[in-house]
Amino acid sequence: MPVWTCPFCSFAYDESEPDAGSGMEVPLPFDDHPADWVCPDCGALKDDFKKVEEAN
Ligand SMILES: [Fe+2]
C-alpha cells in the first residue's frame, strides 16, 4: 500500500493503517481525504504530500 509523506516533518500517512487523527476506524485512501485536509503534525497542505510506494 502507498505511503504518503509530509515534506516538512516526519509525518507519514500509511494507506493500510487507519488515520488515528481523523477518528476513522478503517484505512482511507489518501486521495479520499478532503481537499482541505492538512498534515496533523505541521499543517502542510494535502497537495504538498509525496507518494511513496512501500517496498514489499
Ligand atoms: Fe507535516
Image: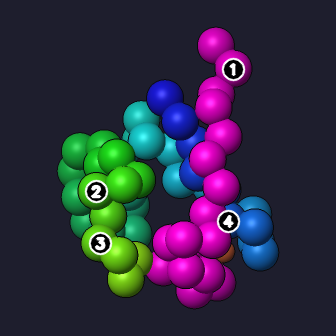
* Residue shown at 57% from the left, 86% from the top: 43
Q: Does the magenta stretch include residue 44?
A: yes
Amino acid of disc 3: Pro
Quarter location, residue 24: bottom left
Q: Do the residues labelled 2 and 4 touch (CB within 8 Å)?
A: no
Residue 20 at what x, y percent from top left?
A: 39, 61
Q: Which of marks 2 and 1 is in front?
A: 2
Q: Where 7 falls versus 19 (above or below)?
A: below
Indicate which disc, 1 or 4, sits on the residue closer to the N terminus: 4
Disc on the earlier residue, 3 or 1:
3
**Does the rendering let one see residue 40?**
no
Quarter of the image for residue 45 reads bottom right
Q: Which of marks 3 and 4 is nearer the N terminus?
A: 4
Q: Mark 4 points at which residue?
A: 6
Q: Mark 1 points at which residue?
A: 55
Q: What amino acid type should be assigned to the residue bearing mark 2?
A: Asp
Q: Where is residue 28 in the image (x, y as percent from the top left)?
A: 30, 49
Residue range corresponding to the magenta coloring: 38-56
Is residue 24 visible in this depiction of the protein? yes
Q: What element carries label 3?
A: loop
